[in-house]
Image (cartoon, helix red, strand yellow):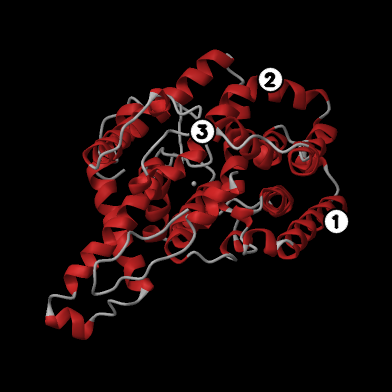
């Protein structure tokens, strides 16, 4: 998962009355077909058949991502491991989609993902070129991000989030083979899916390049992706509650212990900086979330009775790609915007301009603006009529 990347993006920057550096930040691709989605973040509006529990998890995952990128709280990933949740949801939807021809599913996923990415990329690449960036042959990854797209240090906060798109695309391409392998022996394969992260951590250190970063991220979240398969195929509901509870809590305990025991290696217990801890914490935590749905029959159907909240969850799911791709830019722009507020005496006196919570609020206002201005690209990618607000 590239600890050097995640750690560099976690430190928050408070607004100040002087020229400030852009807010430091640290994961979303979403693709759908006519009946289901293929990523952990679902861009389709809610239909009567939708699972509001999953929709709510996606919305919470997005909120947690933006919150972490604003405040840089190391404990945020432990409270809610957003990326593990999103990969698990993507896995279950991918397994459902693969009831159709694999090639058709992969093409559909890429068709729905790439246009929003290209639209966003035009602005980021153009800005980097204006600021003196000289691209090389690796610029091809801005077309299909199977490797980390290159970029300048000036715009690092914006393009570093693309690790999720790259990891998601590789999981999509590998899913036909992974699903076939999983169905040969579901429980053993699921448990053994934690082996790759142990290998890359203890036995073989991947190279410090695009290949190594991709391999580490795949190993980190492989269990969560296959956990989605297990949910879709009904494997989870056949497991005994004591077994699930013991194994899940053991994984969480190991992940947490490893994170705190190795703070000296990274300077923090932030899971984003420690792939092994991230893998085990996410595995245990997300297993409990997915199993709880089956065991307690959770569907959040009552959410539809609270119209404002239900509507908000719908918008978050319908514009997940837009929110993810543009949220870093929104947080970056919030800093110079707040700097302008200091020039207005009334704002300086009555507004908490130095508060990161104020910057958090301004960031969400700018995210809403980007949703209105850019969200229609998701509709076009999904071959739907563009709408301002889904």
Cα–Cα gap, marks 1 and 2: 30 Å
Dividing the picture into quadrants, the one containing residue 349 is bottom left
Q: At 36% from the left edge and 66% from the top edge, which residue is drawn?
A: 360
Q: Which residue is mark 3?
A: 166
Of residues 165 and 136, the one drawn nearer to the viewer in this rendering: 136
Q: Nearer the viewer, mark 3 or mark 1?
A: 3
Note whether 204 is above or below 358 in the view shown.
above
Q: Secondary structure at mark 3?
A: helix
Q: Secondary structure at mark 2?
A: helix
Numbered disc in front, either 1 or 2: 2
Residue 26 position in % (x across, y down) = 48, 53
Which mark sits nearer the N-terminus, 3 or 2? 3
Q: Going by the image, does 168 lie left or right of 45?
A: right
Query: Residue 81: x, y in percent?
Result: 60, 54
3 or 2: mark nearer the eye: 3
- Which residue is drawn at the image coordinates 21% and 84% (left, top)? 350
Task: Give the residue at x 43% y 57%.
Answer: 66
Read off the residue under disc 2. Answer: 177
Q: Which mark is residue 324?
A: none
Look at the picture and state if 210 lies above or below 66: above
Q: Quadrant of the C terminus?
A: top left
Compute the Cα span from label 3 to label 2. 18 Å
Q: Secondary structure at mark 1?
A: helix
Residue 208 visible here: yes
Residue position marked by numbered label 1 in the rendering: 246
């Amino acid at each position: 998962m590239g600890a050097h990347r995640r750690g560099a993006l976690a430190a928050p920057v408070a607004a100040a009355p002087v020229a400030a550096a852009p807010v430091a930040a640290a994961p979303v691709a979403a693709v759908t077909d006519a009946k289901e989605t293929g990523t952990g973040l679902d861009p389709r509006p809610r239909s009567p058949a939708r699972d509001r529990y999953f929709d709510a998890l996606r919305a919470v995952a997005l909120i947690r991502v933006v919150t972490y990128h604003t405040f840089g709280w190391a404990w945020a990933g432990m409270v809610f491991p957003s990326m593990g949740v999103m990969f698990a949801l993507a896995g279950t939807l991918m397994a459902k989609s693969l009831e159709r021809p694999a090639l058709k599913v992969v093409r559909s996923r890429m068709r729905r993902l790439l246009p929003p990415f290209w639209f966003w990329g035009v602005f980021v690449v153009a800005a980097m070129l204006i600021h003196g960036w000289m691209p090389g042959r690796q610029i091809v990854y801005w077309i299909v991000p199977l490797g980390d797209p290159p970029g300048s240090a000036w715009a690092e906060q914006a393009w570093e989030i693309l690790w999720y798109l790259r990891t998601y695309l590789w999981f999509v391409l590998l899913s036909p083979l992974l699903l076939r392998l999983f169905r040969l022996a579901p429980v053993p394969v699921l448990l053994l899916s934690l082996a790759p992260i142990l290998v890359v951590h203890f036995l073989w250190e991947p190279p410090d390049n695009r290949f190594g970063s991709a391999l580490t991220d795949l190993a980190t979240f492989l269990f969560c992706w296959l956990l989605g398969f297990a949910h879709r195929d009904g494997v989870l509901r056949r497991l005994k509650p004591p077994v699930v509870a013991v194994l899940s809590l053991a994984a969480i305990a190991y992940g947490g212990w490893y994170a705190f025991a190795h703070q000296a290696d990274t300077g923090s217990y932030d899971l984003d900086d420690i792939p092994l801890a991230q893998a085990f914490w996410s595995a245990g935590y997300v297993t409990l979330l997915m199993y709880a749905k089956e065991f307690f029959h959770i569907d959040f159907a009552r959410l539809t009775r609270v119209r404002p909240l239900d509507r908000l969850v719908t918008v978050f799911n319908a514009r997940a790609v837009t929110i993810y791709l543009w949220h870093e830019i929104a947080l970056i722009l919030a800093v110079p915007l707040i700097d302008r507020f200091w020039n207005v005496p009334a704002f300086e006196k009555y507004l908490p301009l130095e508060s990161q919570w104020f910057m958090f609020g301004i960031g969400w206002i700018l995210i809403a603006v980007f949703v209105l201005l850019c969200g229609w690209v998701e509709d076009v990618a999904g071959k739907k009529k563009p709408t301002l607000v889904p």
